[in-house]
Amino acid sequence: MSYLTPYTVIFYIFAAITVLSAAFVVFTRNVIYSAFALLFTFFGVAALYVFLSADFIAVTQVVVYVGGILVLLLFGVMFTNSIMNAKPKSDVLHIIPGTLLLLAMIGALLYTFYTTHSWMPSETMLQGSIVERIGFETMSRYVLPFEMASILLLAALIGAAFLARFDKPANHE
């Protein structure tokens, strides 16, 4: 029995792309390079969702994070006047607390890995489309939290538009 199947090799390639691009996001000083590395991180996470048979979440990852948040971040960085006149750089701070947190997370993951007795998938399979099930649950049992989230997002959008268009009075001293 061989553990190195093509499926496993492809999984490790996507996992490596995700981890390496995430490390590049954290450790690079150029904000634009960091944003483009974040693109590979988001796509790598979406590919890992596909490997988990979570196709809907993978598509949502690409649409929301790559199509929305990352593009918004890039436009925000590129169209800011102070950014256009100077090279955008960020300082990599807090290396010691970050390293301690990294070691704690690795320790927790290794503890979970070695204390879990069975990593085999469940024998029970979901019936029907997962997208259909998500839609049914969203519009039946979770309709109130869904509507509350939409009202919260609407309030945030109105607040952001108000702050962006608000003319501040000039200081006359």
Image: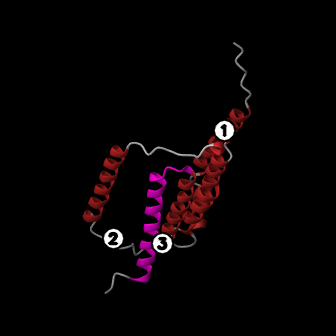
Question: Which residue shows up at 59% across the image and 62% down it?
Answer: 62
Q: In which quarter of the image is the C terminus?
A: top right
Q: Is mark 2 on a helix, strand or loop?
A: loop
Disc 3: which residue: 51
Q: What element carries label 3?
A: helix
**Which is the main secondary structure of the residues drawn in magenta?**
helix
Q: Is mark 1 on a helix, strand or loop?
A: helix
Drawn side of residue 150 relative to residue 104, left or right: right
Q: Nearer the viewer, residue 16 or 27?
A: 27
Classed neighbour count for the residue bearing mark 2: other residues with Cα under 10 Å, few (<14), some (14–19), many (≥20): few
* Quarter location, residue 106: bottom left
Q: Nearer the viewer, residue 150 or 104?
A: 104
Dot 3 or dot 2, earlier in sequence: 3
Classed neighbour count for the residue bearing mark 1: other residues with Cα under 10 Å, few (<14), some (14–19), many (≥20): few
Q: Where is residue 23 in the image (x, y as percent from the top left)?
A: 44, 57
Q: Position of residue 155 (x, y in %)?
A: 66, 38
Query: In this rendering, is residue 148 above or below 68?
Result: above
Question: Which residue shows up at 36% across the image and 81% down it?
Answer: 4
Question: Which residue shows up at 64% across the image and 40% down it?
Answer: 82
Drawn side of residue 74 relative to residue 127, left or right: right
Classed neighbour count for the residue bearing mark 3: other residues with Cα under 10 Å, few (<14), some (14–19), many (≥20): some
Give the magenta-colored segment's residue range.
Answer: 5-31
Q: For the residue marked with disc 1, what is the amino acid? A: Ala
Drawn side of residue 63 relative to residue 93, left or right: right
Disc 1: which residue: 155
State the count of labels.
Answer: 3
